[in-house]
Image (cartoon, helix red, strand yellow):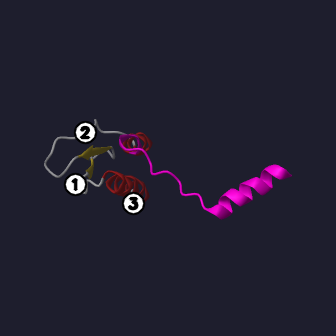
C-alpha cells in the first residue's frame, strides 16, 4: 500500500505546486480507494477512485507547467534532424 500511497501523494504535491493551493488533501478509504478534498473537513471533490483513475483526475485539475527548453536542447534537436 505504501507504494500506491506514495504515487498518489506525489500527484497531490504536484497539484499543490501547480495551483498554489496548499490545502488540497487526499484520503484513502478502507477498501483502498482515494479521494481528494480542498482541505481537511471539506467535502470530497470526487467519488472514491482506484489509484490510476485518481492520479489522472488530480493531474487533470491543473495543467502541468511547460517544459523548460535550453539552448543546448534546441541545438541537439537540430543535430538530430540533420542526419
Q: Which mark is residue 45?
A: 2
Q: Residues within 10 Å of mark 2 (few under 14, many from 20)?
A: few
The span from disc 1 to disc 3 (Cα, nearest Å) is: 22 Å
* First in residue order: circle 2 vs circle 1: 1
Q: Are marks 1 and 3 in contact (CB under 8 Å)?
A: no
Q: Position of residue 2 (x, y in %)?
A: 39, 60
Q: Which residues are magenta?
A: 59-83
Q: Position of residue 63 (x, y in %)?
A: 42, 44
At 21% from the left and 47% from the top, the residue drawn is 38
Residue 64 vertical placement versus 46 (above, below): below
* First in residue order: circle 1 vs circle 3: 3
Whether residue 68 sits left or right of residue 78 in the image: it is: left
At 15% from the left and 45% from the top, the residue drawn is 42
Q: Residues within 10 Å of mark 3 (few under 14, many from 20)?
A: few
Q: Which residue does the numbered mark 1 point to in the structure image?
A: 23
Badge 2 element: loop
Q: Quadrant of residue 5?
A: bottom left
Q: Which mark is residue 2?
A: 3
Q: Residues within 10 Å of mark 1 (few under 14, many from 20)?
A: few
Which marked residue is nearer to the observer: mark 2 or mark 1?
1
Amino acid at each position: 500500500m505504501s507504494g500506491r500511497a506514495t504515487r498518489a501523494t506525489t500527484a497531490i504535491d504536484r497539484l499543490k505546486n501547480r495551483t498554489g493551493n496548499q490545502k488540497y488533501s487526499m484520503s484513502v478509504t478502507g477498501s483502498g480507494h482515494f479521494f481528494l478534498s480542498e482541505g481537511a473537513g471539506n467535502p470530497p471533490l470526487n467519488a472514491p477512485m482506484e489509484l490510476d483513475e485518481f492520479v489522472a483526475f488530480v493531474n487533470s485539475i491543473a495543467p502541468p507547467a511547460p517544459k523548460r527548453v535550453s539552448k543546448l536542447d534546441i541545438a541537439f534537436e537540430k543535430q538530430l534532424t540533420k542526419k
